[in-house]
Amino acid sequence: MSDLLTQAIDKFFYILYLIILFRILLSWFPGAGRGPIGALVRSITDPILVPVQIMVDKSPIGGTMVGFSAVIALFMMNVVEVILCDIVIAIF
């Protein structure tokens, strides 16, 4: 049972990682994120990236031309994934 749950958690985060990476790629091309696919990607990733962007903007590295928020969000997601998998393994 725990193996199935950890695999589901792993797949969920993997898909989320890919969607965030796709959003990063869309940001490199002007106007690429304005269509329906861009709107879908933003609706999925905004709840994760916007709070991180707010924290980064308030930090000393905020306001630079390079966006660190996606990298920080990916790192934080990895930490959450590991913790969730450890909890599932401990419970089951």
Image: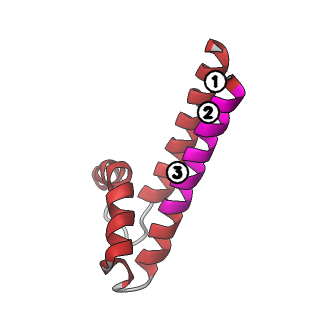
Magenta stretch, overall SS:
helix
Q: Which residue is mark 3?
A: 74
Whole-Å distance between the Cαs marked 3 and 1? 18 Å
Where is mark 1, residue-wise?
A: 86
- Type of amino acid under label 2: Val
Q: Which residues are magenta?
A: 3-19
Q: Residue at x 62, y 29 (%)?
A: 85
Element at badge 3?
helix
Are discs 3 and 1 less than 8 Å apart at CB?
A: no
The x and y percentages for residue 2 are: 68, 23
- Identity, as a three-letter code, of the amino acid under mark 3: Leu
Give the residue at mark 2.
Answer: 82
Q: Which of labels 3 and 1 is toward the front?
A: 1
Q: Are marks 2 and 1 in contact (CB under 8 Å)?
A: yes
Give the numbered dot on residue 75.
none
Q: Nearer the viewer, residue 51 or 67?
A: 51
Q: Please give the name of the residue rendered at 50% of the width and 42% of the height, measured from the top-left corner.
A: 76
Q: Relative to residue 28, is residue 83 depicted above or below?
A: above
Question: Crowdedness of circle 2 by 10 Å Cα count: few (<14), some, many (20+)?
Answer: some
Foreground pick, 63 / 15: 15
Seen in the picture, residue 55 relative to 1 is either above or below; the reply is: below
Residue farthest toward the right in the current orientation of the protein = 3
Callout 1: helix, strand or loop? helix
User: Is-magenta flag for residue 61?
Assistant: no
